[in-house]
Amino acid sequence: MTQTRIRFFDIARGIAILCVILSHSVLMAGTVTPLHTLSHTIYAACFSFHMPLFFILSGYFMHPERKFRWGKELRELVGTYAVTACIVLAGIAIAAKGLRVSVRESLKIWGSAAVYAAGDISQHALWPQSARIGAIWFLLSLFWAHLLMHVFAKLPCTPVWVVVSFVIGYASARWIWLPWDIQSGMCTLAFVYVGYLMKQYDVLAWLKKYPAVWVLMAVVWLADIVLFSGFSLALNDYGKTPVLAALGGVAGTVCIIGISVLVDRVQRIGGILAWIGQTSLALLCAHLIEDDVLPWALFLTKIQTVLPHMPLWIVLFVVRLPLDFFLAWCLSKLPYASLWFYPMKAKQHALSVAQTSHANE
């Protein structure tokens, strides 16, 4: 039973990380050509759930009643962010030299972005930003969400504290955006808490008992996609319908989990998606590296002249997907820090070390 549950959760992560890459490809292509109905729908569907899913599943496996493991959290989240940001800066320097632009100025711009750690450019930043670090904002946001979850879980009226955190993070973002994704973590805590409650009350078993609820979740998710007006957890921007956006993120996650349960019955496809899910952190960081470093707008302009009738978002997705897998493999070869990008391997390594140590006693 445990293996089945773990596998379909990995499948859900696999679907989500593919949707991250796909939606970013649509977004990037949209800077060169306008989005049409299909591409906009794909963009809305992906953005409506992919980041909430990662936070919700993180909460599902949390144990906030235990002590906060500073070393593990700093290493796996903050450390992984720092290593990825350093790789981005190295790539930016190489790219700047190749494009014959100022390496110093490029590093100044992207160094500031790496220090600020914002997922997107905010008009309310403490100092002006010309670039954004991108998708790895998720790592620092998750760190703060985990920390707050451990604090609030030990206080009376935990749900009240979660709501207060969300309100403060959401409201303050309207007039100031602090560095290091602090406010983002204050809001994404709500999704982490939802995942925690799903585990505590065995919501998945309840959903299996009452399958009509799946239909309700699908309706909410569909409504969110149809009325989509933007959704960025990176800047606490929930669009024109913030309540629907938040509910749609949860409903979309539940639907993807349900789809993953069905996919799990197909051995080959389920196995591939589960493997992708286990590699999702490395893929996220690899995707961020190529997204920041490579001059995609320049490439897409040239591709458009060669393939004028081919949707650019499809071309970009097909090109960058194998590139992301290759870069993720490269991250697995990093000395010392490689396991930070592969939590599953890190757990297996720690277990192996513990067993060896125990056997030698």
Image: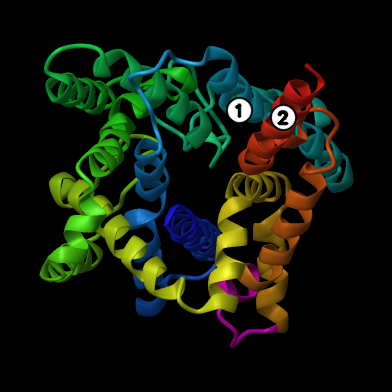
Q: Residue furthest bottom?
A: 309
Going by the image, does 32 lie left or right of 166? right
x and y percentages locating residue 90 in the rendered image: 81, 33
Residue 312 is inside the magenta segment: yes
Whichever of labels 2 and 1 marks the residue nearer the N terminus, that label is 1
Please name the residue shown 66% across and 45% down the image. 282
User: In the picture shown, does residue 341 fall above or below 291?
Assistant: above
Comparing labels 2 and 1, the label whose residue is closer to the camera: 2
Part of the protein shown in magenta: 307-316
Going by the image, does 128 lie left or right of 193? right
Please state which of residues 193 and 90 is positioned toward the viewer in this rendering: 193
Residue 175: which disc? none
Task: Identify which amino acid the numbered label 2 is placed on.
Answer: Gln
Identify the element where label 1 is drawn: helix
Residue tagged 1: 76
Please name the residue shown 12% across and 66% down the image. 210
Please name the residue shown 63% across and 35% down the image. 347
Please state which of residues 253 and 183 is positioned toward the viewer in this rendering: 253
x and y percentages locating residue 142 in the rendered image: 44, 30
- Where's the N terminus, which quadrant? bottom left
Q: Quadrant of residue 296?
A: bottom right
- Where's the C terminus, which quadrant? top right
User: In the picture shown, does residue 249 fall above or below 307?
Assistant: above
Q: Quadrant of residue 154?
A: top left
Whether residue 109 can be seen here: no
Q: Residues within 10 Å of mark 2 (few under 14, many from 20)?
A: few
User: In the picture shown, does residue 3 fall above or below 63?
Assistant: below
Q: Residues within 10 Å of mark 1 (few under 14, many from 20)?
A: some
Please name the residue shown 80% across and 39% down the image. 91
Whether residue 111 can be seen here: yes
